[in-house]
Image (spheres, helix red, strand yellow):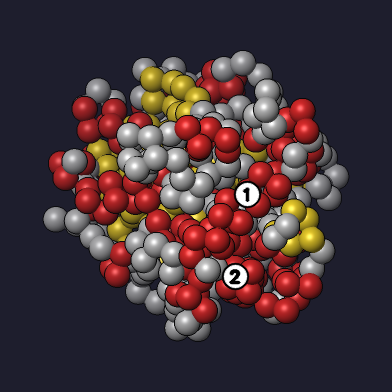
């Protein structure tokens, strides 16, 4: 896979945002079209140059068949390839990987990837999300909430490794600290929090408390990315951000199905409620890039619960398996001096908008010195992880400011 290392570059990004308080509500399709046009304008390309359009799955608040076709009609483009990448939230970064593959094959010159949602404006996110993540036959009839589904793996994680709620709570504290610097973070106005406040917040699904859980973003966000091949990027574009490595692993749909997997990564040794495809995807990305976790200047993840962030730190290689709690407790992601982790506040404090490429945008902005929140000095490489479903679908991308040889 090393031939794909820095074979593709991001040459334009766009974003559109909306909030519940806007006098005129905006649909996900409108936000997607605005973000896509901005990305194309920043890349300096015309409509006829878009050879592929990949979107995330259909937004919950704009359910239509072939959402990608609805968007290409709005943009008035006629790409060779067009598809929804529907592996839950993991499909957002997965779209970039499909684009990179098509670009590397030489059959197109430019690809456009767009992900978006505006359920925070149009619908009840709590009830609807649980309906999507519960097994229609064996789980949904009992009315589970999304936190109750995730709480099962948290319980097992604590049992296996001695992780405590206090360890997980520290992640929420650090994420909130980053969110205080970001003008668009949902929880910025709430101020800092402490471990004690997390542990004393309302119980949602034992052992998950309110401040252990992601906050739904009170609006909508669309993010668009234009990618091209290395030769075109160098010849035609003043700014490039390089896809040094990427990986993807999708293991199941419902949480109960994790108990039936064996013989494939990460379930080589049988069923497991803790190991996820994020570790598999991260290993693929590191192998392609030739880089190591110690060379990452920052890391972003879409993990929607405090304990899951500990797991993702392990899966991305920043500490050994089972050591995430101790790593964080020892200052591993401390706002001052630790690994810059979830630098917009993560899903816990920036807020969750399903399938959001805004984590990727934060990484690109950090590498080029234009972060909207706290800017890191001299960031040269970073890793972003997107997840979807009950720890089901995982995609990882490593970006660098300069090509890696």
Figure quadrant of residue 44: top left
- What is the secondary structure assignment of the residue under circle 2? loop
Badge count: 2
102 left or right, relative to 276: left
In the displayed structure, would residue 264 be above or below residue 404? above
Identify the residue shown where x is 39% and y is 62%.
321
19 left or right, relative to 321: right
Q: Indicate which disc residue 164 carries.
A: 2
Q: Nearer the viewer, residue 254 or 250?
A: 254
List x then y, in percent, for residue 233: 26, 44
Q: CA distance from mark 1 to mark 2?
A: 14 Å
In the displayed structure, would residue 225 be above or below residue 404? above
- What is the secondary structure assignment of the residue under circle 1? helix
Label 1 neighbour load within 10 Å: few <14, some 14-19, many 20+? some
Label 2 neighbour load within 10 Å: few <14, some 14-19, many 20+? some
In the rendered image, which residue does mark 1 sit on?
Answer: 152
List x then y, in percent, for residue 22: 81, 47
Figure quadrant of residue 135: top right
State which tag comes first along the sequence, 1 or 2. Answer: 1
Q: Quadrant of the C terminus?
A: bottom left
Identify the residue shown where x is 25% and y is 23%.
107
Identify the residue shown where x is 44% and y is 50%.
275
Q: Quadrant of the N terminus?
A: top left
Figure quadrant of residue 98: top left
List x then y, in percent, for residue 187: 72, 65
């Amino acid at each position: 896979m090393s031939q794909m290392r820095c074979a593709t570059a991001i040459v334009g990004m766009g974003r559109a945002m909306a909030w519940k308080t806007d006098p005129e509500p905006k649909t996900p399709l409108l936000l997607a079209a605005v973000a896509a046009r901005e990305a194309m304008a920043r890349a300096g390309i015309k409509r006829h140059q878009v050879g592929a359009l990949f979107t995330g799955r259909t937004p919950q608040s704009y359910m239509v068949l072939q959402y990608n076709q609805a968007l290409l009609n709005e943009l008035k483009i006629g790409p060779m390839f067009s598809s929804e990448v529907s592996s839950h939230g993991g499909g957002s970064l997965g779209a970039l990987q499909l684009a990179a593959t098509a670009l590397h094959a030489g059959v197109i010159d430019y690809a456009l990837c767009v992900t978006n949602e505006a359920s925070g404006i149009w619908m009840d996110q709590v009830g609807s999300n649980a309906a999507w993540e519960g097994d229609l036959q064996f789980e949904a009839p009992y009315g589970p909430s999304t936190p109750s589904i995730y709480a099962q793996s948290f319980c097992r994680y604590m049992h296996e490794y001695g992780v405590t709620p206090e360890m997980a709570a520290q992640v929420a504290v650090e994420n909130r600290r980053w969110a205080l610097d970001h003008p668009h973070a949902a929880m910025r106005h709430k101020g800092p929090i402490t471990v004690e406040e997390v542990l004393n917040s309302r119980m949602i699904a034992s052992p998950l408390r309110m401040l252990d859980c992601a906050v739904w973003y009170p609006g909508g966000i669309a993010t668009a990315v234009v990618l091209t091949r290395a030769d075109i990027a160098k010849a035609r574009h003043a700014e490039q951000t390089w896809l040094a490595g990427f990986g993807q692993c999708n293991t199941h749909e419902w949480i109960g199905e994790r108990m039936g997997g064996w013989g494939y990564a990460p379930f080589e040794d049988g069923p497991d409620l803790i190991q996820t495809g994020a570790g598999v995807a991260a290993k693929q990305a590191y192998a392609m890039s030739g880089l190591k976790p110690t060379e990452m200047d920052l890391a972003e993840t879409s993990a929607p619960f405090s304990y899951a962030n500990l797991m993702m730190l392990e899966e991305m290689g920043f500490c050994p398996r089972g050591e995430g709690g101790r790593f964080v407790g020892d200052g591993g992601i401390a706002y001052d001096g630790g690994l810059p982790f979830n630098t917009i506040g993560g899903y816990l404090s920036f807020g969750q908008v399903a399938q959001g490429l805004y984590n990727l945008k934060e990484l690109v902005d950090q590498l080029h010195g234009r972060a909207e929140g706290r800017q890191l000095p001299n960031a040269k490489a970073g890793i972003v992880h997107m997840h979807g479903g009950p720890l089901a679908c995982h995609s990882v991308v490593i970006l660098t400011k300069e090509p890696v040889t």
